[in-house]
Amino acid sequence: MSGLMTGLKGAAVALASVGLSINAVQAGPITFNTAMPVAEGNFVLREQVLLMRSGDNPSGMGRDMTINGLVSVLGYGATGKLALFGALPYLDKTLELNQGGNSSERTSSGLGDLTLFGRHTLYQHDLLGKTVRVAGFAGIEAPTGEDDKRDALGKLPSSLQSGSGSWDGFIGVVATWQTLDYQFDGQVAYRNNGEANHFEVGDEWRLDASLQYRLRPAELGAGVPGFLYGVLELNLLEQEKNQLSGYSDDNSGGTTVFLSPGIQYVSKRWVWEAVLQKPVVQNLNGTTLENDFVLRTGFRVNF
């Protein structure tokens, strides 16, 4: 079940990576970062419900994993170019086992690990009705969630724990091209996962792209209260094998590619959004659990 660890560790980071234009809320990626800044002295709040479903591949062992969560994010525009973020998830996890006609269930719930990071604008070029931004970001995930939960069968596996127990670091670069009709974002990111309890989740690389296109109104005019955007994202995730007591776990790691259609309604101060991540490629090692889907929905608001 270690294939879920990457998604869990990265969920808060993806949600924390929200951005706002200087004067108003804009459309933006739903599953990853943007280079658009948070206005100096302003705050941004993002709440997003996360639903993840995973199961065994055809050669697996009758396992199904359900994860429901709420990720709360608060960002602050420290300067016109520097934004600081904090994100804290609450996760409810259930692992169902069906082996030899016998069914059992293991569950856990609680606050997860705290993510803290900064994003700084490296390049900016503004044109009439258009802007290009490039930003770098880096941060840590602190082991604030409980990582020693137990049930009647003993200590829960790592993928069921609320926290990882490890200090993890990440770094990346994101670029944004924004016009009045559409916005395109792309990012590359690397994550180094630490060791805890003789277990280390494999390090990971991400490559993401997002297109947000204004569907309504078709033409811009005065007095429009909000805008409807169609969103299409592509997420590539490459994870190394996990390490257990210094040995590689051959049932972990691999490559996953998600195609993620979504929708956003954008008003002057808030955004409602939803996206469905469906895997189109899953080249995973051994009996790693396969992703069925990830659904994200929620809102963000600046003040």
Image: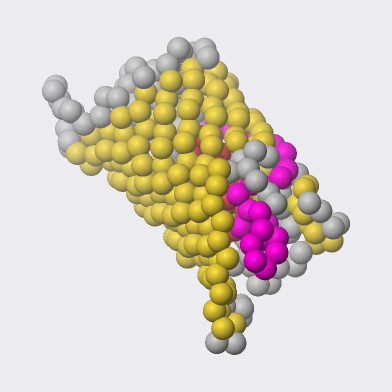
Residue farthest to the front, as pictured: 152
Please state the total of marks drawn on the protein image: 0
The image quadrant of residue 246 is: bottom right
Residue 37 in the image: state x and y as whole percent.
46, 22
Residue situated in front as seen by the camera: 277 or 146: 146
Residue 244 in the image: state x and y as whole percent.
80, 59
Q: In the image, 301: left or right of 257?
A: left
Q: Judge whether residue 78 is colored magenta.
A: no
Residue situated in front as seen by the camera: 283 or 178: 283
Residue sitting at x 61%, y 77%: 60
Rendered position, 108 above or below 63: above
Residue sitting at x 63%, y 43%: 145
Residue 84 in the image: state x and y as whole percent.
55, 23
Quadrant the N terminus occupies: bottom right
Residue situated in front as seen by the camera: 244 or 203: 244
Can residue 52 be seen from the camera position used here?
Answer: yes
Quadrant the C terminus occupies: top left
Residue sitting at x 17%, y 36%: 217
Can residue 137 be seen from the camera position used here?
Answer: no
Question: Which span of residues is magenta-colored?
Answer: 149-176
Q: In the image, 89: left or right of 222?
A: right
Rendered position, 256 above or below 215: below
Q: In the image, 282: left or right of 27?
A: right
Residue 76 in the image: state x and y as whole percent.
49, 20
Q: How is the image coloured?
A: secondary structure
Rendered position, 212 above or below 130: below
Residue situated in front as seen by the camera: 170 or 53: 53
Residue farthest to the bottom, as pictured: 100
Q: Judge whether residue 159 is colored magenta.
A: yes
